[in-house]
């Protein structure tokens, strides 16, 4: 355990003194909203969940008027930053025309055409509203096409909150000896259909297919493990998964809810040069509005097109979300990704240097516009390697950042947007040096 504590007690007292509006709003919210928050992940914020009034570019302002450099970016969707002009203009144009139709409109094919042009595996796409539901569509489609009920997932990977996929996500160290699916919470159905393997471990994948020969419908993975450490695939690992799926009659599904439109315009599959059969997208593809996408090859998407596989949803293809998506996609040029990669490297190096100068053991993993800080000495390559990270020290660091006007996520993940300029990166590093 490192002795550096970032002066937690004093900082928490100062934050509480500077955020009475957030505390009052949180106390009021708890009287009518379960837990006082709209998703359980926000409840862990210290000293309490903050309430925000508005965001602009790389900055977000709370209800007390405190302004923060934002590296949470709404947990990933804001690839262009807060309230980008192009998206605002697209929404302003659509608002007076109608908020939703429950019927077809031209933005559907405009967005679909842009997505098919950008995503390597996309002959066709289908729309929904969240990452959780579009993953369910992908897995249903894989079961239908193969006639099999099981699927293979990796320890630490997150594919939504549905019972079928919310297993073996950040299991405790003493539970990692078993490769059986481990539910995350109580009330989940006891059978998920999941077969669990270890990320970047070829032997565990081969063993899973050997143990369940002819039963596995799909391999699903984040092409970079963003939800548990931003751990890239080792050289050749995605190619190995591609080959394994093909040789065993299973589909390869990339969950690109985070990597999509963040690592590259064509997602992780473009970035790493491996094309899956199906891929799911959300977060950045909606430009800040709720949107998810299933992209896939014609031979599989035809099962949805002709109704053999049911895909439904009242708000699917919502015109406001698609207006934002079309505007965002036009903004996401190769130059944007080159800049995000350069600034991401600059920020990672700056954070590492500032923290190591304080005697804090730290390594970073990730790519471009999404990376992770690990308060440990060794660079992790799979989920289990992240368990030794000093989470208590990182919690103190987060509080110190908040006190210094920098907002980051509690799990160690950092997001950049196109609105984060070099001046913002330099200011962030300066503030970390001053902690």
Image: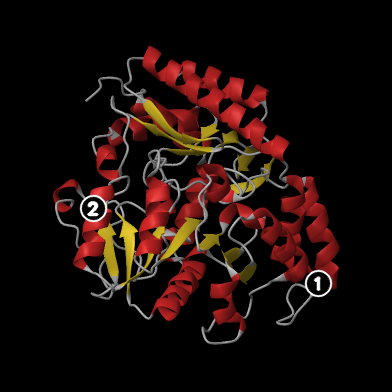
Residue at image location 81% in from the left, 66% down from the top: 95
Instruction: Name the side, left or right, on which 211 lies relative to 254.
Output: left
The answer to which of marks 2 and 1 sits earlier in the sequence is 1
Q: Is residue 118 above or below residue 407?
A: below
Residue 64's image quarter? top right
Residue 182 in sight: no
Instruction: Name the side, left or right, on which 191 lies relative to 121.
Output: left
**Location of residue 182 in the rendering, given as x and y in whole percent from the top left corner:** 23, 62
SS at mark 2 in the image: helix
Which of these two is toward me, 368 or 61? 368
Residue at mark 2: 204
Residue at image location 45% in from the left, 72% down from the top: 136
**Location of residue 309 in the rendering, given as x and y in whole percent from the top left corner:** 51, 83
Query: What is the quadrant of the C terminus in the image?
Result: top left
Q: Residues within 10 Å of mark 1 (few under 14, many from 20)?
A: few
Q: Most extreme residue toward the front, as rendered?
A: 247
Residue at mark 1: 106
Q: Residues within 10 Å of mark 2 (few under 14, many from 20)?
A: some
Q: Is residue 52 above or below residue 309?
A: above
**Location of residue 154 in the rendering, given as x and y in whole percent from the top left corner:** 32, 55
**Location of residue 192 in the rendering, given as x and y in whole percent from the top left corner:** 29, 72
Residue 92's image quarter? bottom right
Task: Tell how many labels.
Answer: 2
Which of these two is toward me, 256 or 303? 303
């Amino acid at each position: 355990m490192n002795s550096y504590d970032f002066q937690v007690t004093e900082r928490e007292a100062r934050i509480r003194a500077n955020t009475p509006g957030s505390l009052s709003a949180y106390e009021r919210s708890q009287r009518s909203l379960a837990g006082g928050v709209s998703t359980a992940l926000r409840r862990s914020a210290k000293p309490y969940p903050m309430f925000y009034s508005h965001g602009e570019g790389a900055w977000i302002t709370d209800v007390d008027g405190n302004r923060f450099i934002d590296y949470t970016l709404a947990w990933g969707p804001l690839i262009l930053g807060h309230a980008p002009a192009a998206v605002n203009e697209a929404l302003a144009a659509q608002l007076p025309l109608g908020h939703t139709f429950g019927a077809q409109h031209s933005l559907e094919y405009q967005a679909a055409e842009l997505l098919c042009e950008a995503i390597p595996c996309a002959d066709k796409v289908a729309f929904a509203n969240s990452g959780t539901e579009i993953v369910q569509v992908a897995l249903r489609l894989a079961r239908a096409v193969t006639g099999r009920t099981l699927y293979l997932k990796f320890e630490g990977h997150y594919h939504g909150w549905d019972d079928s996929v919310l297993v073996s996500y950040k299991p405790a160290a003493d539970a990692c000896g078993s490769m059986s699916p481990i539910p995350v919470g109580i009330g989940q159905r006891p059978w998920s259909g999941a077969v669990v393997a270890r990320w970047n471990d070829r032997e565990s994948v081969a063993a899973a297919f050997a143990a369940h020969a002819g039963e596995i419908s799909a391999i699903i993975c984040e092409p970079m493990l963003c939800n548990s450490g931003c751990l890239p695939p080792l050289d050749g690992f995605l190619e190995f998964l591609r080959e394994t799926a093909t040789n065993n009659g299973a589909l390869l599904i990339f969950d690109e809810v985070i990597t999509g439109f963040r690592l590259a315009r064509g997602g992780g599959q473009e970035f790493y040069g491996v094309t899956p059969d199906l891929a799911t997208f959300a977060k950045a593809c909606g430009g800040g509005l709720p949107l998810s996408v299933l992209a896939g090859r014609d031979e599989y998407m035809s099962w949805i097109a002709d109704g053999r596989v049911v895909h439904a949803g009242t708000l699917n293809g919502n015109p406001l979300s698609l207006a934002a998506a079309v505007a965002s996609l036009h903004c996401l040029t190769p130059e944007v990704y080159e800049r995000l990669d350069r600034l991401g490297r600059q920020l990672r190096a700056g954070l590492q240097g500032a923290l190591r100068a304080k005697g804090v053991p730290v390594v970073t993993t990730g790519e471009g516009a999404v990376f992770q800080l690990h308060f440990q000495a060794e660079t992790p390559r799979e989920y289990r390697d992240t368990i030794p990270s000093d989470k208590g020290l990182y919690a103190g660091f987060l509080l110190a950042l908040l006190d210094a006007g920098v907002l980051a996520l509690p799990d160690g993940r950092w997001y950049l947007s196109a609105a984060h300029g070099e001046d913002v990166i330099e200011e962030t590093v300066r503030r970390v040096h001053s902690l």
